[in-house]
Amino acid sequence: MDLSAFPYLQGNYAPVDEERDLDDTELKVEGKIPENLVGAYMRDGANVAYQPNHYVYPLDGDGMVHSVYFDNGKVQYKNRWVQTSHLMTERKFGHTIYGSVGKLLEVPQDVIDAGGEPNPIRNTANTNVLYHGEKLLAMWEGGFPHLLNNDLSTVGLYDYDGALQPGDALTAHPKICPVSGDLISCTQRWDSPNYWLQVFDRNGKHKQTIPVEFERKGIIHDLQITDNFVVIFYAPAFHSLEKAMKGEDPFLWEEELGTKIIVIPRDGSGDNKIFETESFFSWHYCNGFEKGGKIIIDYIWINSIPFTQAQGTGVEKQPRRMYRMTLDPKTMQVTNEQFSDVFCEFSRVDERRMGKEYRYGFAASSNRSWGDAHGYNCTGRYDFETGETKLWEFGEEANAGEPAFVPNPDSEREEDGWVMNFVFNPGEGAFLSILSAGNIDDGPVAKVHIPGRVPNGFHGNWCQDLTL
């Protein structure tokens, strides 16, 4: 492949073409792995298999999951492409067939006649990998999730026993309630402007659908829960399928409309509350909770829509900052304040405190400027009790991924857990970093060095007790 035209396919954004299986004799461990960890850290990401026709921002690219398995202090590593129908069709023909979210291609009739995937919208399965209800799912917000086996082999599309209907697109950013074990998710459709909250119980069985009506389909990437509410941001960001099929820029930003914050009762009763603010965009929440009758939301703020069809605009590199928003349901006032001036994204929290008052947030962070393609060379810890931000730098040229919190099974304290993420540092190579959540100043308690490269990716999670 010639990837030279695409900044977000250079360096550690570049794909790898090999699926590997490495045991503890092939993985060098530096430091000491906590022996009470039993499970797997898994992370999904975009990994193009064939020459792309268009690639401005890593929204596209075939999903590949990378996993490190832990059991009694020993580790194993695997990586696998998610075998989607789109990827398998391209494998059959040996070349790129499908376009990007920003520039769709009509599927050739001979491909359809040969039994290939007819949908021009590629289900990439590249955004998140989640273990819930004893189901391992590779997720993308534009379609059904893919069910995986523990060894990352693909079972196929998963519709939650018929709860998802053809055309439903399940979010890649659900939240798990630490009290009930419910998975709070949502579906959107390409043929409707509306939004549907979907609730699945701790066993993965569908419980409830809560519809939210909109006049226009917005780009709503994430959601946040509190004890009693679900909060979503409805920014003036839109995607036009019609423009995408014509080869025109399908991404619209209508700043004059402002951003609306929709607060939805989790039990489906009562009316939604709609708060209005000046325009901003956000990919990801950190956490949210209720206190003193108000709703607190911590999230990553971006000034405007951070992607376009055109190359070289730089919009994808615009600043990202940790913000704290306070919503007052009585006065309908919104307070929106910057918490830190550190460039950051992919914010996470101890999932046992999801929707609850908490102290620490973690995010992929940067203490340097970047060139053609932005990135992150640090893990940041954001202390919402003291207001302090601490960074652990992996190296000036390092690429550090999203930090996922791994709870200590022998402690309920946030400080006693660990933070895991994949890192690639030139000269050092690829490794899984394990930081102490309570003491990032001392650096990783352990590094699992992985021969070869683990490319930059998106979201990952700790899968408790999942083993080979």
Image: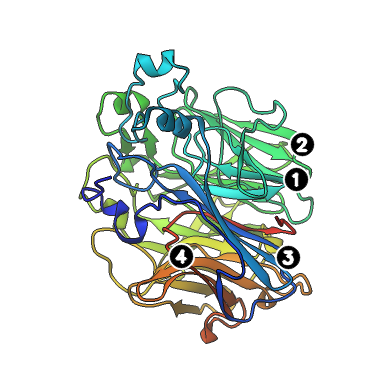
Q: Secondary structure at mark 3?
A: loop
Report, in whole angstroms, how far the alpha carbon at label 1 lies from the one at label 4.
31 Å
Marked residue nearer the N-terminal end (1 or 3): 3
Say the numbered circle drawn on residue 44. Answer: none
Asked if the residues shown at circle 4 and circle 2 are in contact, with their CB atoms under 8 angstroms apart, the answer is no
Q: Quadrant of residue 438?
A: bottom right
Q: Nearer the viewer, mark 4 or mark 3?
A: 3
Judging by the rendered image, the residue that carries numbered circle 3 is 38
Q: How many marks?
A: 4
Say the numbered circle drawn on residue 133. Answer: 1
Residue 319 position (above or below residue 17): below
Marked residue nearer the N-terminal end (4 or 3): 3
Q: Nearer the viewer, mark 4 or mark 2?
A: 2
Give me the residue at 29% from left, 42% from top. Answer: 308
For the N terminus, the quadrant is top left
Q: Nearer the viewer, mark 1 or mark 3?
A: 3
For the C terminus, the quadrant is bottom right
Q: Nearer the viewer, mark 1 or mark 4?
A: 1
Q: Secondary structure at mark 4?
A: strand
Asked if the residues shown at circle 2 and circle 1 are in contact, with their CB atoms under 8 angstroms apart, the answer is yes
Judging by the rendered image, the residue that carries numbered circle 2 is 205
Say the numbered circle drawn on residue 322. Answer: 4
Give me the residue at 41% from left, 64% from top. Answer: 321
Report, in whole angstroms, how far the alpha carbon at label 4 lies from the one at label 3.
32 Å
Marked residue nearer the N-terminal end (2 or 3): 3
Tell me if 348 is positioned left or right of 276 in this view: right
166 vs 29, nearest the viewer: 29
Report, in whole angstroms, how far the alpha carbon at label 4 lies from the one at label 2.
34 Å
Tell me if 420 is positioned left or right of 267 in this view: left
Q: Secondary structure at mark 2?
A: loop
